[in-house]
Image (cartoon, rainbow, N blue to C red):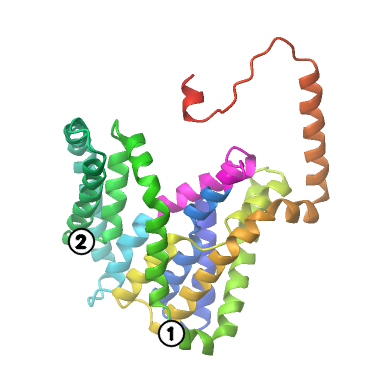
Amino acid sequence: GGAQVFITLFASISIAWWLGLHLTSAFVIGSAFAMSSTAIVSKILMERVDLNSRHGRLAIGILLFQDIAVIPILILIPALGASTSDVGTLFLMSLLKAIFLFSILFKFGRPLMNSWFAVVANQRSRELFIMNVLMITLLFSFASKMAGLSYGIGAFMAGMLISETRYRYQVESDIAAFRDILLGLFFISIGMLLNLHQIASNIGYVILITFGFILFKAFVITLLTRLFNYEIGVGIRTGLILAQAGEFSFVILALAREEHVIGTHAFQIILAASLFSMILAPFIIQYNGRIARYLSKSYNRNSADTVQAIESIGRSLKDHVILCGYGRSGQYL
């Protein structure tokens, strides 16, 4: 995960800087392209029952690192947009603020959050419970903004703190119905940022950048998984699954635009390329297995050998127990 983020970030910065963009704009573009879509990937892998496959576990592991790596990026962007030239000092101050907030929250916030959720849960009102989660998220976002950080950092802190409570599964279950709606609203807000006339006049650049970074990102992830001794077919599948931009890409771009770190022209082109890559993502993920078997004949043979090995083991079993459904409840059993 770390190597993928660093290589994608460094390569994107180098290319953007070589094309004449300012170094800060190049950093924003590289950061946006380094992210992948957790929502799209996890949903499709779950629907295809691929979460526990080798490429599925690899993809989720890389996505988790990307979600963590976005924190210092969101802290750095406001510092890059500051009028003063002492970016290092501003970044250090913002980082110290974030560390201080995280420390205070996880030292004192966890027991307080458990107690507060217990009070709310005792009211036995599902609507009140959901409103409580929303209120906490908004309060954390507002507090983060008041501390000189972004709204996204505050929402991220709220999510991490709620995940440490006894009620995390209840929260996950209650907000599941709203997840797709909120994700839809998120993409509507992103679509409203697009200038269709500007994109139409630069459609060639948008298409070139879209396919260029999809192929490059898939190649980088495939190469890295091979270096870590994974099978080439597994690497190809992981690379194809993570080849798109992600939700945090839009958060990074929107924050950079708000802080005047990236120009309007570059913002529109990169935003459109990121959006197009996510539109293509479901189709790429759907056929990642076929593409991997086409590009790697050894992967096809190894898959057949694995099936034969499982069949041979199954023939020797008798008087055994089959546990159907090894989800959260199955693991507890």
**Residue 40, horizontal then vertical, whole percent:** 52, 55
Quadrant of the rendered image containing residue 78:
bottom left
Asked if the stretch drawn in magenta spans residue 62, the answer is: yes
- Where is mark 2, residue-wise? 145
- Mark 2 element type: helix
- Mark 1 element type: helix
- Where is mark 1, residue-wise? 265
Quadrant of the rendered image containing residue 276:
bottom right
Q: Name the amino acid type tagged 1.
A: His
**Residue shown at 79%/26% (left/top)?**
311
Q: Mostly what secondary structure, the magenta segment?
A: helix
Q: Which residues are magenta?
A: 45-69
Front residue of 300/327: it is: 327
**Residue 284, horizontal then vertical, whole percent:** 65, 60
**Residue shown at 19%/42% (left/top)?**
104
**Residue 323, horizontal then vertical, whole percent:** 59, 21
